[in-house]
Amino acid sequence: MARRWEDLADGIRSRDPEAVRDLFRTHHGMVFRFVRRECGSRDEAEELTARVFFRVIDSAFEFRGTTAMLPAYLFGVARNVIRENRRDVARWIPMEDAVTSVQPAAHDLVQVEDEWSRLREAVACLRPEEQEVLHLRFVEGFPLARVASAMGLPVGTVKSHIHRLRVKLRGVREPQREAT
């Protein structure tokens, strides 16, 4: 049984091993899936997920929300870790490697891969709040009320976000439909 966040935060601040285990067991899968969606490899996602939990443990005293808001807090920390990692990696990639890795051979791409690529690009262009709604609702499968609670938003606002997301992401497939 998961502990209340307030108790968990107190345990983490005091470096209680059981509290740290509880936090990790309860939220690791959700954070890993969120990070994995943004990363190039499973190894990188595992590394960044670990960094997220170390950062949360180090900054547990900063969290002032309710238990229901914990997923949004974890996603915020994860976004920051991913952003920092991208910035650090970009500093060390030689320019010629970056250019060749960005230009895949067109003959190697199949139609499904192209569609997934367009979808990933469209998701990357969404605002962070929209990405969180998308992840919580459709990847984690949270019901609307839990998404709203986790993000500190009214249910109606979450519904509006979902409607706009569907409209935006539906446009990704329409050029494909016109071609057929």
Image (spheres, grey):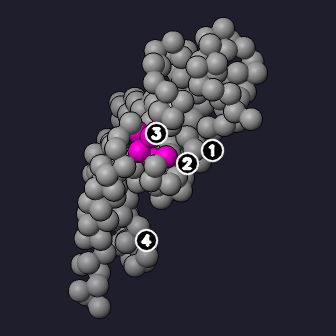
Secondary structure beneath dot 1 equals helix
Nearer to me, 148 or 127? 148
Mark 1 vs mark 2, CA separation in Å: 6 Å
User: Mark on residue 29?
Assistant: 1
Q: Residue at x 53, y 21 (%)?
A: 55
Secondary structure beneath dot 2 equals helix
Query: Residue 172's quadrant in the figure?
Result: bottom left
In magenta, the rendered stretch is 146-151
Mark toward the viewer: 1 or 4: 1
Instruction: Tell me which amino acid carries mark 4.
Output: Glu
Mark toward the viewer: 2 or 3: 3
Nearer to me, 96 or 110? 110
Residue 157 drawn above or below residue 21? below
| Residue furthest to the top | 14
Query: Residue 159's quadrant in the figure?
Result: bottom left
Query: Residue 31's quadrant in the figure?
Result: top right
Where is residue 18? Give x, y as percent.
76, 21
Instruction: Tell me which amino acid carries mark 1.
Output: Gly
Residue denoted by label 2 = 33
Mark 4 vs mark 3, CA separation in Å: 32 Å
Mark 2 vs mark 3, CA separation in Å: 17 Å
Residue denoted by label 3 = 150
Residue denoted by label 4 = 113
Q: In the rendered view, does 143 fall on the left or right side of 3?
A: left
Q: Residue at x 24, y 78 (%)?
A: 175
Residue 29 drawn above or below residue 17? below
